[in-house]
Structures are given as structure tokens and as C-alpha cells.
Amino acid sequence: MPSRAPALLVLEDGRSFTGYAFGAEGETFGEAVFSTGMTGYQETLTDPSYHRQVVVMTAPHVGNTGMNDEDPESHKIWVAGYVVRDPARVPSNWRSQRTLDDDLREQGVVGICDVDTRALTRHLRERGAMRVGISSTETDARKLLARVLESGEMAGANLSEAVSTKEAYVVPAVGEKRFTVAAVDLGIKANTPRMMAERGIEVHVLPATSTIEDVLAVSPDGLFFSNGPGDPAATTGQVELLKSALERDVPYFGICFGNQLFGRALGFGTFKLKYGHRGINQPVMDRTTGKVEVTAHNHGFAVDAPLEGSTTTPYGEATVSHVCLNDDVVEGLELRDEQGKLKSFSVQYHPEAAAGPHDAAYLFDRFITLMEGTA
């Protein structure tokens, strides 16, 4: 076990925890959230949706499979900080190329270990997600708290452009090309265009700042909005882009942040959840089929739409298609025309499931039938 410096964690309500430095030494700030996944920590760390968040792992033992070059979901670790109870002393997996500690250090990600993550998680469940600071250089909790209170809040933060690609790129279809999709990168994970490509879709990944002209320039059969960080209520450009696409009847599929922006384009509001859904074990019902699926989540905001009945919008009739069975949070939306034909849809979770169960992979097939006009 490497020698570790003492470290301090302070929440914005004054609750503090002590432990030891894990990863890079130094100081970091962000929104404290917890993830319930017992596996898939590499995919979690490299998910751009965690930008500016300090992730608390509820699984007690983290790092035992090491890190490799095949599983990252983006080009870097995005979390602002990392909190674990028992870091693995030695990785034990044939695919491991480095330790988790090595990658955190190399990328400058400040973390803390030997923390009572059960107590910390219970506190966040009771009090809600909140700002936090981790430091291996500050020993005075009051001084660190003062800096926590000066740090930025997640509510009102527009972050998708910070994590998006700067230049458009293409993920070619595997085998015969069937469709072309314009995918707006709001924090896209690598497995998403990969799963579309496996279904014969040529994916044009576009920057978050793209306009409707940029989308139409690739002559898409469909439009896709990815997951991403930040407050959907603080985002305007992508909502206007989506409205323009809906006016032109471009088939749309959105996930996570893309679900929230779809809700806003349809006229619904969004709100911040008390502590959010993060992990790979969330039960969701697809109300269009009655099927219950176990799903991967990472979101702190949700759409405020009526669970029953339909809502008339300028683009058609909108209904809630999926709902979380834990708390009745809206997990999906559908838009249909006057004849009841599906025009667009979205879900709040991650059907690309990296990491996570594959229960929701059918949604990519539903996108295919939507673009075929047979949905």
C-alpha cells in the first residue's frame, strides 16, 4: 500500500470527513453525488456527464480491475474528484494496464480514500447533492468550507460546450450503410455512436454549438442528442436547434440530457432532483410495452411532464413513455402526430450501457424503425 498524505473532505453544509489522498494530491471542488454501480468505474470516470462533479462510490472496494485503453468512454477522466472507501492495493484482471491510482494521478484528479462512504451517502440522500471540497493541502475544515461556499453551483450551469467535440467527425457504418444520423455531442460516450454504427448507421458527430444548417448539411435521416452535464434550463441554443428540426419533421432520438432538452423543446419545464439517479441498477418501465428494464443512469435533473394523458405541442402530441419505478420520475417522452404515428422519442437513461445492463439496447432498434417510417 503506497504511503498516502492525510486528506480532508468538507460539504457545503459543514459536514466533514477525514481520510487519505487518493490519486493526485491537491485541492478540488464540485458537486458531491453518489454512484451505486458496483462495476464500471472506468466508464463512470470517463463519462463527460460527470464534469464538475465529485463522485462518491457506494461500492466499498474500488480499483480491483485496474485501468485499460479499451474501456474509456471519452479521451479523459472528467470527474472533478473521486471518493472511495477501500482502494484496491493491486489490480487483479488480465486486461489491466495501469492502476486506478496511476490514472488519477497522471490526469490530476484529486481524490480521497478511507472515508466512511456509507455515512457520506446517507448524508447526501437526506440533505441532497451539494457542493464539496477535497484537499490534501488544507487541514482546517473551516477554511476549506469557506472556499467550498465560493465555488460554483450546478444549478444554472451551462456545461455541454465545455465537454463537446470541437470539430465534427464521422463514425462509419459497420457493413452496409442504411442511414445517416447527425449526433449532437453534448458529452457523448464512445459506445453510443458505436452501437448505432453496428446497426448500419453512419454517425456524423457534431459540436454542441451546431446550428440547424450544420445538421441539414449532412442530409440526415435522423437527429440524435447525447447525454451531457449541466442544467438543461441554462441551455438555449440546442433547444432552438431541436425546435427547428421538429418543425421539419426530422426524426429525433435523445438520451439523458437529450431527453431533458426534448422536454424543453416540447414546452415542459425541468427541475433539479434532490440527489439524482447515478448507477447501473435503476428500474424503469417502458409504458408503451409494459416491459421493466434495469438501466444505467447519470442525471441530476428531470423533466416536469404529466405522467398521465397527452400534451398538445406545436409539433404533435407528447406523452410520458417511460417512468422510474423507484420515484415516478419521467424517464422517457414520445411525440406522435394526429394519427398516432411516432415522430420522435427520448429516454432519460443510457441505452448504450457502458457500463451497465443491456436491457435498453432495443431503443437503438426503435430509432431504426422510426427512420424507416415503420415505428
Image: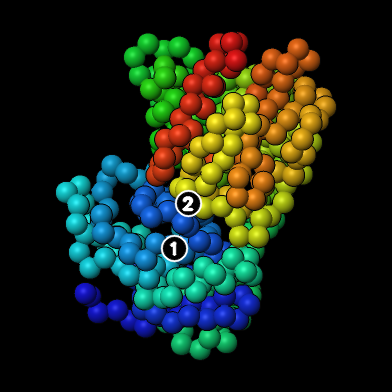
Q: In percent of the image, x 33 and y 70: which residue is there?
A: 86
Q: Is residue 254 visible?
A: no
Residue for badge 2: 279
SS state under label 2? strand
Residue 114: x percent and y percent?
36, 76
Residue 69, quarter of picture: top left
- Separation of disc 1 and disc 2 at Cα? 10 Å
Q: Identify which amino acid the numbered label 1 is placed on.
A: Thr
First in residue order: circle 1 vs circle 2: 1
Q: Identify which amino acid the numbered label 2 is placed on.
A: Gly
> Considering depth in this image, is 113 or 120 the residue closer to the camera?
120
| Whether residue 25 is situated above or below residue 287 in the rendered picture | below
Mark 1 vs 2: CB contact within 8 A: yes
SS state under label 1? loop
> Considering depth in this image, is 18 or 104 the residue closer to the camera?
18
Q: In percent of the image, x 72 and y 51: which residue is there?
A: 271
| Whether residue 228 is situated above or below residue 25 in the rendered picture | above
Q: Residues within 10 Å of mark 1 (few under 14, many from 20)?
A: many
The residue lying furthest to the front in this view is: 290
Residue 135: x percent and y percent?
45, 77
For the C terminus, which image quadrant? top right
Q: In percent of the image, x 57 and y 72: which residue is there?
A: 123
As drawn, the label of residue 58 is 1
For the N terminus, which image quadrant? bottom left
Q: Is residue 224 visible?
A: yes
Residue 138: x percent and y percent?
46, 84
Residue 8: x percent and y percent?
45, 80
Q: Is residue 139 left or right of residue 104?
A: right
Residue 264, quarter of picture: top right
